[in-house]
Image: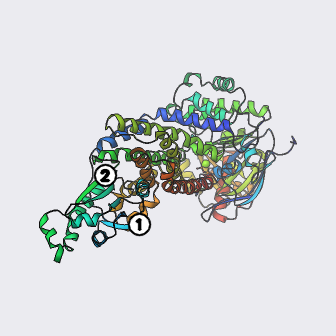
Amino acid sequence: MVLTNARFSLRRFWAMICKEFLQMRRDRITFAMLLGIPVMQMVLFGYAINSDPRHLPTAILSADNSVFSRRIVAAMQSSSYFDLVRTVDSEAEAKRVIDNGEVQFVLSIPQQFSSKLVRGKQPALLLTADATDPAATSSALSAFRYFAAEALAGEFRGPLSYLQRQGAPLQVIVHPRFNPEANTRYNIVPGLIGVVLTMTLVIITSLAMTRERERGTMENLLSTPVRPLEVMLGKIIPYIIVGYLQMGFVLLAAHFLFEVPLSGNVLLLLVVSLLFIVANLGVGLTFSTLARKQLQAVQMAIFFFLPSILLSGFMFPFRGMPRWAQWIGEMLPLTHYLRIVRGILLKGNGLAEILPNLWPIALFLLVSLSIGLKRFRKTID
Amino acid sequence: MNNSAPVIEVEGISKIFSGKTVVNRLSLQVERGEIFGFLGPNGSGKTTFLRMLCGLLRPDAGGGRCLGYDLLSEVEKIRSRIGYMAQHFSLYDDLSVRENLDFMARIYAVPKRRQVVAETIEQMGLEPFAGQLAGTLSGGWKQRLALAACLLHQPELLLLDEPTAGVDPMARRDFWEQVYALTAQGISALISTHYMDEAERCNRVAYLAYGDLLTAGTAEEVVSRSGLSTWAASGLDIQELAARLKGVPGIELTIPFGNNLHICGTDSGQLEQSLRPFMSDERFRWQKQETGLEEVFISLMNRQARGGDGSH
Ligand SMILES: Nc1ncnc2c1ncn2[C@@H]1O[C@H](COP(=O)(O)OP(=O)(O)OP(=O)(O)O)[C@@H](O)[C@H]1O
Ligand SMILES: [Mg+2]
């Protein structure tokens, strides 16, 4: 019999894919789960979960250098809601730092703020907020109105004491960007794409391989010329397709059921999602090499899924979490993927803006897939 | 490759699982066209040895050749030329008979796949079940499907791990006819089994106990090398006889077969002398008998358990 000694055979690879699809079709319950999970999640997370995050990164765009503006900035700095992380010099720069998620707020102090203030003309302060997650910004906003006025009151002494009697010395204009109606569904529903993908793909891939071992079919498979990479890719690719189906499903539901405006480039989202999908499959694969039984595989998948859903900024605003939780969150692919999904769908981000969140996913993918492959090679032995 | 070279040729092969030696410096040769029987008690390392031959496990020591390819470095070449049937059914329960065979044929890149699969289904008498899920077949039919699956790519060597366990006598006979037909075409087979009648159907047998190869050769060689002589006593109260014979010098072991008691010893003179007083017992008929493989294997195991050296 003629056999090429090629390291990778497309034929065997194709045989694996066909087999996986056949088995997927037979396994009605799993198949129903694959489509049922997105539906269930959509229903469950129609609600919002509130919280009171602090230390939100803020930038200052100041066109007025006076004792009053300095006083407001100082008050902001001493409040626990805002962390002044930088100053910006132009409107364009202000837009950029908000678009790429570097800050949550930009406080713009207009020209002649102090002179208008002194003349009692009630000048306006503009607070631009990244309101994709309204839960994260609402309490900070109401706090700001209060202490800005409070801070100035301290300055209205001596010759300026007449300003105290005038009522509100200034106006605060809030400009919530991306989600002007503070609709939490806008934030939750796109995030569901990431949650659904993490949940199903990690569980399903960790099961797929463990099942071969538990049922003893691995022994037969490995006594044939099939190569580890062929087995692995043969198992992964059908689930990539499943991942995209789920994604399409959530996107359609988001648009037609929940009326989330899909302002961004959906094609870009589909492309970068591949990284995220494969990163999750890598995790599932690694688990499948560790688990002896299918039950163990599921337990491990849940072990990964829980921090992902709790610490990624899906359930609670990321910036509201304690520092250590944020550290863990930063290591999870879902955290970065959520920022990308929300960035693209709600803010209309392009590739440049999502790049800071793209490379951590790529890194995670590299690590998880190579551990998976390495461990898989070992179990064959 | 050289046609007279042995198909399996291993030297000092060992496998150790977490400190426990499961296969102990085993050396073995299997010739082309031969049916080689592999026997031994449960847990003696038969499956482990077969797994090492098809590259599922790496030997911890020793090495050798299978079909002329090195066991350690040419595993790929070996895998595409052997047909391995695992002890437990290891095809997919949730695929139909035809789908399973089709999958295996694709994996082995069998030319004219559809035709080969259809022919195999017909030859193995699997037509009535072709569309049935493999998981719903009865045990014997699963074994048959598993055998069919490892014949698709026309392997040169069959490694069959207890292929007839739980199979009815008719199906076992069919199975052996099939194996004979295959070996007539020059295919070799290494078959592990617990059935003595099957051991006797093999050209040569090897007996493994707790990792050690105790003996190997044709059935006659194995029997004559054991030096055992056997007497049979038939009657109704053989249990009581067996109890009385315990500890009598020259009697190595007694094995009941229905209404027969086989009594063996290595020193035929002393055996006869020790049995003489019992022969006057009217209840039993006494007869000298050919020693069978079963007696040899049991005595080998006893000796190994007692002496622990297994030297023979
Ligand atoms: N993967 C493994 N890890 C640890 N121990 C193992 C492993 N595989 C087999 N063993 C041990 O090796 C010994 C030999 O097992 P093996 O399956 O080779 O025996 P066998 O001769 O095939 O027995 P049987 O007749 O019951 O099939 C057993 O004691 C078994 O527990
Ligand atoms: Mg066995």
Inter-mark Cα distance, 1 to 2: 20 Å
C-beta proximity under 8 Å, tags 1 and 2: no
Q: Is residue B188 visible?
A: yes
Q: Which of A351 and A189 is in front in this view?
A: A351
Q: Nearer the viewer, residue A73 or B12?
A: A73
Report the amino acid beneath label 1.
Arg
Report the amino acid beneath label 2.
Pro
User: Is disc 1 placed on a helix, strand or loop?
Assistant: strand
Q: Does the residue labelled 2 lie within 8 Å of ligand 1?
A: no
Question: Where's the N terminus of chain A, which quadrant?
Answer: top right
| Image quarter of residue B245 | bottom right
Residue bearing the label numbered 2? A176
Q: Residue furthest left?
A: A165
Q: Is residue B273 visible?
A: no
Q: Is mark 1 within 8 Å of ligand 1?
A: no
Q: Earlier in the sequence, mark 1 or mark 2?
A: 1
Residue B257 in the figure: left or right of residue A136: right
Residue B104 to residue A123: above or below? above
Q: Which of B21 and A361 is in front in this view?
A: A361
Q: Which residue lies furthest to the bottom in this view?
A: A158
Residue A45 in the figure: left or right of residue B250: left
Determine the quadrant in which ligand 1 lies.
Answer: bottom right
Residue A136 to residue B5: above or below? below
- The answer to whether dots 1 and 2 both sit on one chain is yes
- In the rendered image, residue A40, in percent from the top left (x then y), is placed at 33, 41
Packing grade of label 2 (10 A; few <14, some 14-19, many >=20) is: many
Mark linked to residue A86 = 1
User: Is disc 2 placed on a helix, strand or loop?
Assistant: strand
Question: Where's the C terminus of chain A, which quadrant?
Answer: bottom right
